[in-house]
Structure formats: C-alpha cells, structure tokens
Image (cartoon, grey):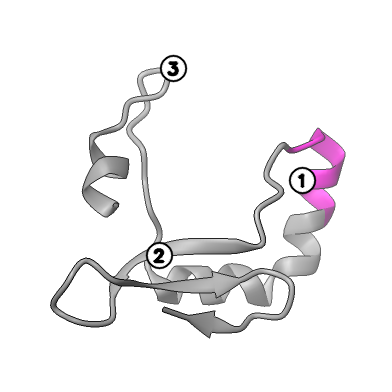
Amino acid sequence: IAESCNNFVFSNNEKGYLPSLGELVIAYKLKTEINQCLNIIGSIFKSNYYASSTRYNTGANRWDLKWSDGDITN
C-alpha cells in the first residue's frame, strides 16, 4: 500500500504519501486541532482507521490507527 501511495500522482502533480505509524500517533495527539481545521475547510476525510506505512511483520501487513480513540491495530 505504501508503494501505491508513493507512485500515485494527484491532479496538482503532487506525489501521494502514506505516513508512518509514528507520524499518525503525533497527528492523533493533535486530533482536536486537526479536526477543527478540517471542519473549517469542510474536509471530506471521514475515515475512522488510518493506514500507516509501518509494517508489523515481514509480509504486506501494516499498523493502523483508529482516529476515534487512538487504538493501534494490525
């Protein structure tokens, strides 16, 4: 999934990006501020689970962060 994001190019020619689990944890700690900003701009991001680029084993499995409570799952 990280490779797919890295290879994706948006219509503004920006490359896609999949954050690491550590980056998602930092974002979760700033959840209130981030949600306030997203509400102001009318964001379309409504997902409850966010995928990370951090793998939890040697396979294609990854760690996810649950936005509602910060739970980390795989």
Q: Quadrant of residue 71?
A: bottom right
Q: Nearer the viewer, residue 55 or 13?
A: 55
Element on which disc 1 rests? helix
| Disc 3, SS | loop
Q: Residue at x 21, y 66 (%)?
A: 60
Between circles 1 and 2, the one closer to the viewer is 2
In primary-sequence order, the first of circles 1 and 2 is 1
- Is the residue marked by circle 2 packed among few (<14), some (14-19), or many (20+) residues within 10 Å? many
The answer to whether residue 55 is left or right of residue 49 is: left
Image mark count: 3
The residue nearer to you, when weighing 49 against 17, is 49
Check disc 2 and report its element: helix, strand or loop. strand
Query: Which mark is first along the chain, 1 or 3?
Result: 3
Q: Earlier in the sequence, mark 2 or mark 3?
A: 3
Q: Does 7 sit left or right of 17 as displayed? A: left
Q: Which numbered dot is residue 52? A: 2
Query: Which residue is the site of mark 1?
Result: 38
For the point 82% across and 35% down, the residue is 42
- The three-letter amino acid code for the residue at tag 1 is Leu
Residue 18 vs residue 47, the one in the foreground = 47
Q: As shown in the figure, which amino acid type bears the numbered disc 3?
A: Asn
Q: Which residues are magenta?
A: 36-43
Q: Which residue position holds label 3?
A: 12
